[in-house]
Image (cartoon, rainbow, N blue to C red):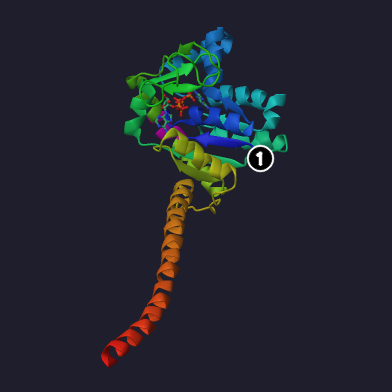
Amino acid sequence: MDIVLLGPPGAGKGTQAKRLEDKYGLVQLSTGDMLRAAVASGSELGGKVRAIMDAGELVPDDLVIQLISERIARPDARKGFILDGFPRTTKQAEALDKMLADKGLKLDHVIEMKVDDAQLVDRISGRFTCATCGAGYHDRNHKPKVEGVCDRCGSHQFVRRPDDNAETVKKRLAAYHSQTAPILPYYRAKGLLQSVDGMAGINDVTAALSRILDGGAARPAPSPAGAVVRPAKRAAKPAARASARTKSKPARAKAKPVRKPAPKARPKRAKKRPIKRRSKTKV
Ligand code: AP5
């Protein structure tokens, strides 16, 4: 299974990718992580992209396409992958299609995580990450269960990203809206795009994503008008409501049959009463 998680900075792509890795045995391919690794290693590529990333701008397409192409070719990616942060432009989306087609592969799901901009700055400014396995946390929303210990790998080392400050986040958001959001129609037209409500709690988002990956949410038909919005949420909520209804309706349905025997009982009493009344009358 090969999937793309799309969404603005702070939408929860990395958080959920880690969970989907663990649950489905997929490999997270985060271009952001790859670029940060390049910066940290002091490589030539790192030197080229450091200032761009710190400014909250997008790294040139050709560099990122090359990076992801090499990564997808590695054997572990054949377990299936979760692309996190790629593609981010129409050129990258088209290049991805080509590199997959060349390998005889295709995307199974493209999932947009929808979060209001107002919440993203708060999420990102409170973010910290396990330095060993990359699991993401938040100062208030999502702390490790044991303070200072990564839930996922037990590491005691955490890091904060240099581009996680309010000023850069606003630039990253602007880049998302101007350069990345335009690829949504590209995937919608292919009938691949589904959405989840990224404003929900972390566990609820994982559940919504799992429903899609498990085939529980209907894949929407291509809709140039963009009529399909948040199918995963819609699939989830009505399902939840439906199950609530299913639970309450049978309860009521069961209640009725329970009440129905009552009339059966009443006729019995009714039979007895006339006898008594008659006997009383007679007496
Ligand atoms: P990248 O590393 O990809 O960053 P991003 O896309 O901006 O996304 P983030 O990693 O910031 O957010 P996320 O959605 O993963 O959120 P997270 O799960 O951490 O890119 C960085 C830079 O690299 C770019 O600016 C660009 O320069 C360059 N780059 C990368 N890819 C590129 C490409 N393809 N082309 C060109 N340039 C590229 O969650 C955030 C916080 O919220 C965490 O603290 C988390 O605990 C919390 N949280 C998560 N979910 C929830 C929830 N449901 N409720 C409450 N809190 C939550």
Residue 181 in the figure: left or right of residue 73:
left
**Residue 78 at x, y percent in the picture:** 70, 30
Residue 199 in the figure: left or right of residue 85:
left
Helix, strand or loop at mark 1 = loop
Along the viewing direction, whichever of 133 and 69 lies nearer the viewer: 133
Along the viewing direction, whichever of 87 and 83 lies nearer the viewer: 83
**Residue 213, quarter of the rendered image:** top right
Q: Is residue 248 visible?
A: yes
**Residue 86, quarter of the rendered image:** top right
Please give the name of the residue rendered at 54% of the width and 32% of the height, measured from the top-left corner: 87
User: Magenta residues?
Assistant: 174-180
Please, is residue 241 above or below residue 3 in the view?
below
**Residue 105 at x, y percent in the picture:** 69, 38
Please give the name of the residue rendered at 36% of the width and 29% of the height, measured from the top-left corner: 120
Quadrant placement of the N terminus: top right
Residue type (three-letter) at the residue carrying disc 1 = Lys
Reading the image, the residue beneath label 1 is 106
